Image (tube, rainbow, N blue to C red):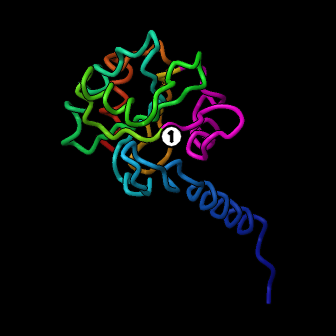
Amino acid sequence: MSRPSLSTLLALLILVIGAVQASADSPLSGTVKKIDGSEVDLAKYKGKVVMIVNVASRCGATPQYAGLQKLYDTYKDKGFVILGFPANEFGAQEPGTDAEISKFCTSNYNVTFDMFSKIVVKGDGQAPLYKALTTQADPAGDVKWNFEKFLIGKDGQVAARFTTRTTPEDPQVVKAIEAALAK
């Protein structure tokens, strides 16, 4: 029996590395609690274009809820979803209970996209979802403030990251969503 050539071994190694990278954990794994208390498996969103946003009710960026809702209304029938995750790590700007947050979002911004229970997005107790997002995004690193946006493609991988200063209406955001939907 002859030994495989170096080029054959190298080709095999490239295939294995590619398979490992392709199977990297998607942020869309595990379960989270919706704002109404029900459990949701994030895998249900695979195959869709997903925007994940850490939100807060008492932040200077809180009016971004309106832009997020408009984005959702514009693209929801094309396979786009928004997942809002209240977080209180930045200036304690989300001190409310889930019920208070839900009422605030509905009565002030008519939010109809999926909202979830308050979670930790940075530091001690960071939720696994945000650990995956902040590790896999480009650039990687901690969430800096409320209303940071992560766009996940249909393949379940992070496709883009937008800072708080980049509003939902920004042409960069719209372009990234439309590109992800077209894939």
Q: Quarter of the image containing the C terminus?
A: top left
Q: Quarter of the image containing the N terminus?
A: bottom right
Q: Which residue is mark 1?
A: 158
Q: Quadrant of residue 83?
A: top left
Please tell me whether residue 39 is drawn above or below residue 87 in the rendered image: below
Q: Quadrant of residue 106?
A: top left
The stretch drawn in magenta includes residue 130: yes
Q: Which residues are magenta?
A: 118-145
The structure residue drawn at horizontal position 40% and vertical position 16%, both measured from the top left corner, is 62
Please tell me whether residue 64 is drawn above or below residue 149 in the rendered image: above
Residue 156 placement (x, y as % from top left): 46, 49
* Viewer-closest of 26 and 52: 52
Q: Can you name the residue that lies furthest to the bottom here? A: 1
The structure residue drawn at horizontal position 29% and vertical position 40%, both measured from the top left corner, is 80
* Viewer-closest of 88 and 165: 88
Please tell me whether residue 179 is drawn above or below residue 19 in the rendered image: above
The stretch drawn in magenta includes residue 55: no
Residue 70 placement (x, y as % from top left): 23, 24
Q: Secondary structure at mark 1?
A: strand
Residue 14 placement (x, y as % from top left): 67, 59
What amino acid type should be assigned to the residue bearing mark 1? Val
The structure residue drawn at horizontal position 45% and vertical position 33%, both measured from the top left corner, is 97
